[in-house]
Image (cartoon, rainbow, N blue to C red):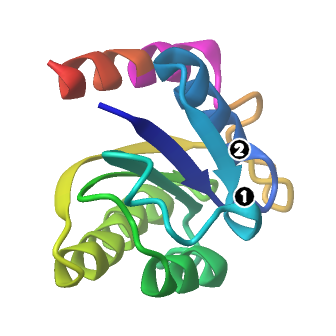
Amino acid sequence: MRKVVVYDSWTGNTKKIAERISQILECDVFKVNKAPLDLQKRYDVIFLGTPNIRAKPSEELSKFIDNANIPKYVVVFVTYGTPIWGIISSYFCAREIKNKIIKKGCVFLGKFICPGVHYKFKTYKNRPSEKDFRKLKAFLEKLLR
């Protein structure tokens, strides 16, 4: 299956996950503002990544989903930086993306949620870490079986 990663990143956390997915799967990766809008012809699976912005995906990624011709199969990844509420609200963020892609006729394959350093609150320093990347690799291996 031909795979692609499209992400938005504000502080670099989501970018790190996106780049690691691209390395592991040996696939193309685009920052959302550089991604082509017609991906369905070239790819079978898309990995959509966003920082968790108050329980929602970034506005840029949300607009991309609305306007792009995305592949049939979708995997979502979300990064967050605030303790407790961050992980909880990340599930709401992933669910919003899931609902958007299902309305477009796509199939949701799964989600990966990961903490990342929050520069204002000084939380989750040195994250995503190598431990997070090992979890990501295990998630991807399970997903692709």
In the image, which disc is placed on residue 60? Answer: none
Q: Which residues are magenta?
A: 128-136
Say whether marks 2 and 1 touch (CB < 8 Å). Answer: yes
Q: Which of the 4 image quarters holds residue 112?
A: top left
- The amino acid type, in three-letter code, at marker 1 is Ser
Q: Residue at x 52, y 23 (%)?
A: 132
Q: Assess whether residue 133 is covered by the magenta stretch.
A: yes
Residue 2 left/right relative to 7: left
Does 86 lie within the magenta span? no
52 is higher (above) or lower (below) than 58: above
Expressed as whole percent of the image width and height from the top left, the position of residue 109 reads 19, 48
**Residue 77 appears in the picture as rendered:** no
Q: Which residue is denoted by mark 1 in the rendering?
A: 9
The percent coordinates of residue 99 (x first, y second) are 23, 79
**In the depicted view, which residue is nearer to us: 60 or 92?**
60
- The residue type indicated by label 2 comes to Lys
> Which residue is nearer to you in this view: 19 or 87?
19
Mark 2 packing: few (<14 Cα in 10 Å), some, or many (20+)?
many
Between disc 2 and disc 1, whose residue precedes?
Answer: 1
From the viewer's perspective, is 103 left or right of 32? left
Residue 18 vs residue 88: left or right?
Answer: right
Q: Residue at x 56, y 72 (%)?
A: 37
| SS at circle 2 | helix
Query: Which residue position holds label 2?
Result: 15
Task: Classify 59 as above or below 29.
Answer: below
| 45 vs 130: above or below | below
Q: Nearer the viewer, residue 74 or 132?
A: 74
Quarter holding the C terminus?
top left
Q: Main secondary structure of the magenta part?
A: helix
